[in-house]
Image: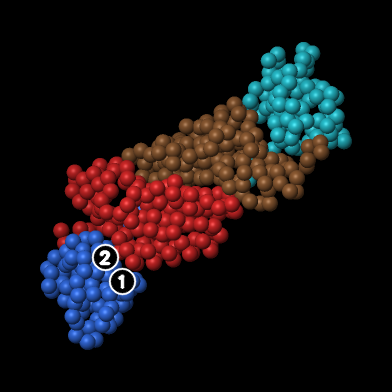
Chain colours: A blue, B cyan, C brown, D red
Amino acid sequence: MVLAFASFREILGKEREICLVEGATVRDLLEELAAARPAFNEAAFDDTGALRDYVLLMVNRKRIDPILDLSRPLQDGDELAIFPPLAGG
Amino acid sequence: MVLAFASFREILGKEREICLVEGATVRDLLEELAAARPAFNEAAFDDTGALRDYVLLMVNRKRIDPILDLSRPLQDGDELAIFPPLAGG
Amino acid sequence: MIEITEEELSMEELIKRARSKDAGAMVTFLGSVRDDGIERLEVEAFREAALAELESIQREATSRFALKAVEIVHRTGTLAVGESIVAIVCSAGHREEAFSGCRYIIEELKKRAPLWKKELGERGEHWVGQDEPAGK
Amino acid sequence: MIEITEEELSMEELIKRARSKDAGAMVTFLGSVRDDGIERLEVEAFREAALAELESIQREATSRFALKAVEIVHRTGTLAVGESIVAIVCSAGHREEAFSGCRYIIEELKKRAPLWKKELGERGEHWVGQDEPAGK
């Protein structure tokens, strides 16, 4: 299950189920979304294919590191949340 | 006019008019009150005749220094307020 | 608005008065009689001098922290445990100023406003802040 | 109590809930939509994650500042200028803890709670805190 919030909800919709091959990682899922939605590709990745700074991620409601944890494999039933920085000040 | 608050009100009453000779100072007025009311004498002055630390004074609603300003002469119509430390913490 | 009153105070009313469209943040302080083994509190004010001092404090806080509105109410008279003693409401553009303004006002009020509290309970009577009993 | 709600919030109600006889001090924070050339604000929450984060923040503040009670309400949905967005009420034995606890909660909420705000007005739309428009 992918949940998207704020500007990413506007691109991806609030939630969607995605079927992945076994062993697929967070990065695989993000690239699948980018392939399906050019607007998400542009919003989430820079020209070199690196994830932009303002893409924040949670797996099962725990923040993950958008650099170190991209290679984390996803399990059946995992919930990935994609969102921009919090409202802040 | 003498106004007294809190513990000093309990001894002196809330307000009273006092007639003083011309040129009388704040100290003269306090001593007059002490002479009339032994409880005030005990509350306001220590054994050496010095004003106790917790006697605070205002003349015409302005704080005066209980050491330096005791020699200040009072004018007709002046209002002296006598009170203990403020409620604080 | 600044008030010294025997009446109960309404936070809702104070908050309503302090609201404005340019105030993004409002901080309030409410002090109440704490159950410290006392039965009630008597609050006494040198009313005219206290109002003047609270007005000075309000002016200082307003200019120092760019406050949009300040409300201060202090009660006098006999108050039971749990009853409100003092309420302060500060509104400002942002939360930093609203917090600092509200804190400044309560600290200065405690230091400077001619107000006294007598605690009454099983252990007897006691004027708060006065260590040596005056003439007792 | 912690709430994320589309409904209007009542400070009076929150203050009533946070009152207790051992709480001598209560500090509240109320954040509202500021008239910054915007017409309205849309607030979106990742509701379950935000509730869990607010509960963590509440627990941290309660133990760090010995708070007696904490109330947090955050609104979501479309809010007009002047409407309340978030209310926090902290009670404690003394004012130092009540101020520090309330300040801690609003700062951590802003940093950590998954909540987003979109400003809408004459100048268009803008997600607060996001400098680069995502895909626009």
B4 shown above or below D65: above
Q: Secondary structure at mark 1?
A: strand
Earlier sequence position, callout 1 versus callout 2: 1
Per the image, the residue denoted by label 2 is A83
Q: Quadrant of residue D37?
A: top left
What residue appears at the point 13 percent right and 74 percent down from the top-left corner? A35
Q: Tell me the amino acid under the disc marked 2.
A: Phe
What residue appears at the point 22 percent right and 58 percent down from the top-left corner? D132
| Quarter of the figure with the N terminus of chain D | bottom left
> Separation of disc 1 and disc 2 at Cα?
9 Å
Front one among D8 and C62:
D8
- Chain identity of mark 1: A
Estimate how packed mark 1 is, as few (under 14), some (14 to 19) or many (20 or more) residues with alpha carbons within 10 Å. Answer: some
Can I make out residue A31 in this image?
A: no
B33 shown above or below A2: above
Can I make out residue B62 in this image?
A: yes
Q: Tell me the amino acid under the disc marked 1.
A: Met
Q: Is residue A45 left or right of residue C65?
A: left
Q: Number of callouts in the render?
A: 2
x, y (%) of residue C39?
Answer: 67, 46
x, y (%) of residue B24?
Answer: 78, 17
Q: Quadrant of residue D76?
A: bottom left
Q: Quadrant of residue C65?
A: top left
x, y (%) of residue A47?
Answer: 17, 69
Per the image, the residue denoted by label 1 is A58
Kindly check if marks 1 and 2 are in contact, taking CB atoms under 8 A apart as contact. Answer: yes
What residue appears at the point 69 percent right and 40 percent down from the top-left corner? C118
